[in-house]
Image (cartoon, coloured by chain):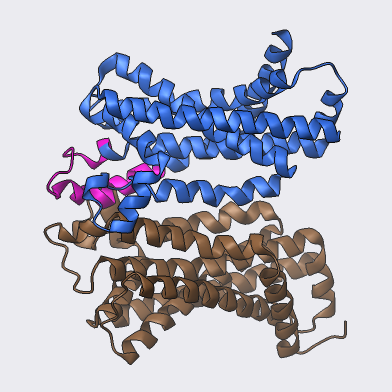
Amino acid sequence: MSEVALLAQRSVVRTLRQPAMVVPSLVFPLLLLSINTSGLETATHLPGFPTNSYFQFALAIPFIQGALFSANSAGTNVASDIESGFLNRLALTPLRRVSLMLGQLTGILALGLIQALTFVVVGLAFGDGIAAGPAGVVVLVLLSLTISLAFGAIGAFVALRAGNGEAVQGTFPLFFAALFLSSMSLPRDLIETDWFRTVATWNPVSYMLEGIRSLVIEGWDAEALALGFACAGGIALIAVAAAGSALRTRMVRT
Amino acid sequence: MSRGSFFSVARAVAWRNIHNWATNPALVIPGVLFPMFFFTAFAGGLSRIDNVPGFDYGAGYTTFVYGFVLLQAATFGGVFSSFSIARDFESGFSRRLMLGAANRGGIVAGYWIAALVRALTNIGVITVVALLVGLEVHGSGIDIVGLYTLAFLMNAFALLFGTGVAMRLRTMQAGPAIQTPAFLLLFLAPVWVPYDLLTGWVQAAASVNPLTLVLEAGRGFLAGDPTKVLPAFAVVALLVSVSVLWARGGLRSAERVA
């Protein structure tokens, strides 16, 4: 455990010590939330729109955008460790791979926690509150952390496979594509374009958004939460396993 | 390298930049993908917005969004090209270029030609996709010339603004200083709905944002209902004129340290 704790501490300190990593992951999602809310408030006039406040509807988006920044941060940190030779030096120690992986991802969870708490506070300050109440806030933060872990592990996987930061940056647009092709802007049943609704229905990001949105707008919706946690947790499991495998390969190469 | 004239310098710089860009997918793909994401996400995901009372744009929501994405692609063609200037300073190439080029205005012209090629590519791809998914152009040939002229002037403005910043800071760290104002200018305009349907602080920002006029004129050309044409061209001409002076100042600053 002590080796995990040491690496986790290093990962947390390194992440939080870089304002360029923390500030954009908070400022950009909130700026876009503000712009979207002013630009799309009229969407609430559509018949069947689930709330009369677009802010409440759009509040779920920053949680996902923050997690996308986590993916970028995790990947960049791991790539930096590879490029600087830190991983090579660790490979010479009796450190276990699982410790290394857990340590690296702890920094992302710390960033994810800061993001989630910030977005919850903004939601409470400028919106109509969280419909699911205080317990809902706890579940919301847990779901947000699972999503951060999922995307963070994907970022770490890409970095371990490619071994350089440029490849991590190159995957950033793909993460954004996943967000854009989801039920980000309108509920799925209000999306008019057939192909887009189909893509959004197959896109797991839609269910992550809808899980968060259910807590903010409706209260407790077991199905939306189950789907949200299943999608985020499933991706997290697959991505952590893939990153572990990529780490094993990289350690062997070392 | 022999000391060259304006045109030979511009040609050489343009060729080098276009070659570097075209042979590097990491440079080509983001310029095409970002406007494409916006187009698909909003034309597809928000298409029902045109059912909202007060949304009266005859050519349909896909065309409405295309009007924005066209300007975005043109502007980001200029923004991304100005990153090349910063990179060239960081690598030391620009110092050598300054020593070899007698007419340094040709350097800026070369980067501008490269930016134009990038914008043409981005716009070409997005237009083909837009036509495939239902872009309706109600405007005449003259309207279309007006639309693309506005877009290419925005491309020149973005490149010249970025040039001024990149030549003053001479580092890739200048990226956010170039990108953020362009991003804000674009997104604090009526992007998803007409100006009258905006609410809150974004409507206040859009009312003083020069891009609002340009966007409304572009959408008017597409709908075959030209609107605010003269003010839009006046605004773009002013932006380009000011950015020419800004870029010239940047070039002078770079010359002093070359």
Q: Nearer the viewer, residue B108 or B135?
A: B135
Quadrant assignment, res B178: bottom right
The colour chain A appears in is blue
Viewer-closest of A190 and A76: A190
For residue A50, which quarter of the picture? top left
Comparing A228 with A51, the one in front is A228
Total marks shown come to 0
Residue sitting nearer the eye, B176 or A77: A77
Q: Can residue B40 be seen in this view?
A: yes
The shade of chain B is brown
Give coordinates of residue A92: x percent, y percent.
88, 23
Percent x, y of residue B102? 79, 84
Q: In this view, does A238 lie above or below B245?
A: above
Quadrant of the frame with the C terminus of chain B: bottom right
Farthest-out residue, top: A1
User: In which quadrant will I find the N terminus of chain B?
Assistant: bottom right
Residue B196 as seen in the image, left or right of residue B190: left
B97 to A186, vertically: above or below: below
Is residue A237 shown above or below A204? Answer: above
Tell me, yes or no, whether the highlighted magenta stretch contains residue B227.
Answer: no
Q: Main secondary structure of the magenta part?
A: helix
